[in-house]
Amino acid sequence: MKDFRKYYTIPALAEDVYTALTNPVTIQLWTGEPAEMTTVPGSEFSLWDGSIVGKNIEFEPGKKLVQQWYFGDQPEESIVTILLHAKGMSTSVELSHTNIPDEDFEDIEDGWNNSYFGSLREFYKD
């Protein structure tokens, strides 16, 4: 099991980034794929038409979201924590993804950098 931590800068207000990460309509706009998402702790979610699935754990509007990502039958939960830090007209995103199965690590790292936050950054570019 491996952990992944990284900071990203998104050219949008923290409240807008939070909405982009939690509102299924907005998620579909920047991913181009159907999404199922709610900010109810304990609810399940599905992103990229089922490529990413899991359970929502905690939300703090405009500041934080915590999710469990499913990787089949693994002994320890894979937890994603996203913290949003307002930096003027942009947002510093602090990502922590723990307990990633070794065989999935490279795909997950690439997904965070290019598909997930890469797409979100492109969505907000002028």
Image: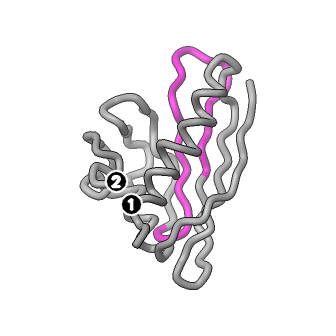
Q: How many marks?
A: 2
Left or right, 55 with reference to 24: right
- Rendered position, 56 above or below 83: above
Q: Measuring from the top left, give residue 110's x and y in whole percent.
A: 59, 36
- Rendered position, 124 above or below 32: below
Find out whether the residues at labels 1 and 2 contact each other: C-beta distance under 8 Å: yes
Which of pointers 1 and 2 lies earlier in the amino acid sequence? 2
- Give the extent of the magenta segment: 61-81
Q: Measuring from the top left, give residue 50's x and y in whole percent.
A: 34, 29
Circle 1 packing at 10 Å, graded few (<14), some (14-19), many (20+), is some
What residue is drawn where x is 45% and y is 64%? 18
The amino acid type of the residue labelled 2 equals: Trp
Mark pair 1, 2: CA separation: 6 Å
Q: Quadrant of the C terminus?
A: bottom left
The amino acid type of the residue labelled 1 equals: Phe
Q: Which mark is residue 123?
A: 1
The secondary element bearing badge 2 is classed as helix
The secondary element bearing badge 1 is classed as helix
Whether residue 23 is in magenta: the answer is: no
Circle 2 packing at 10 Å, graded few (<14), some (14-19), many (20+), is some
According to the image, what is the colour scheme of the structure?
A: one colour
The residue beneath circle 2 is 30
Q: Quadrant of the N terminus?
A: top right
Q: Measuring from the top left, give residue 15's x and y in whole percent.
A: 44, 74
What residue is drawn where x is 68% and y is 58%? 7
- Rendered position, 36 above or below 58: above
- Rendered position, 5 above or below 26: above
Residue with the most extreme bottom position: 88
Residue with the most extreme front position: 126
Q: Which mark is residue 62?
A: none
